[in-house]
Image: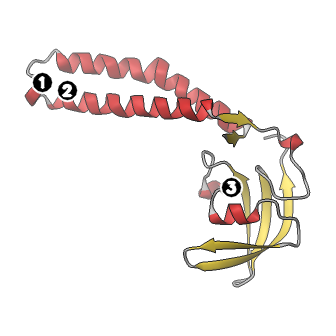
Amino acid sequence: MEYLSKQRYDEIAAELKHLINEVYPKVKDNLAEARAQGDLSENAGYREARRIQGKTISRIRFLQKVLEHSRVINPDDLPKDRVTLLSQVEFTNLSTNTRMKFEIVSPHEMNLEAGKISLKSPIGAALMGKKVGEIAEARVPSGILRLRIESITSDSSV
């Protein structure tokens, strides 16, 4: 089971609705149009339409599974004194003395450019459950990172 923020759950549901109600009917029409052009063995338009149909169906099924196996998490139910899902964590990499700040999110919400790391990533997993002042050790490809937690905040409006 995956836990999602209400915002991300709604985004996935909206994408699924868009794919089912708008994109897929157009894909089916394009496929029928390409099929009507004759010999399917040498019809590049038909092969392309089938490829797009397959990708669309695959995405629809994936999103359906995500929603089926996800639950919306209420940030108010989470502890505020330790790192949990939807926590914004500021920490210092002790080997480089670099400070970073990330929000801990589900893998379906991860976006490094937006400052969101997955709770299943090496750093996210190492931070989970820690309190301010504690040291987390994250095993990454380059070795072990020692991270000191400086602050934990949570946004209840998520």
- At 82% across and 60% down in the image, what residue appears? 129
The disc placed on residue 40 is 1
Residue at label 2?
A: 46
Location of the C terminus (image quadrant): top right
Q: Secondary structure at mark 2?
A: helix
Query: Which residue lies most toward the front here?
Result: 1
Whichever of callouts 3 and 2 sits on the residue coming sooner in the sequence is 2
Locate residue 41, reporting x and y percent.
9, 28
| Number of callouts | 3
Which picture quadrant has residue 121? bottom right
Q: Secondary structure at mark 1?
A: helix
The disc placed on residue 119 is 3
Q: Are marks 3 and 2 in contact (CB under 8 Å)?
A: no
- At 82% across and 58% down in the image, what residue appears? 83
Could you tell me the amino acid type at mark 2? Answer: Tyr
Residue 37 shown left or right of residue 135 in the figure? left
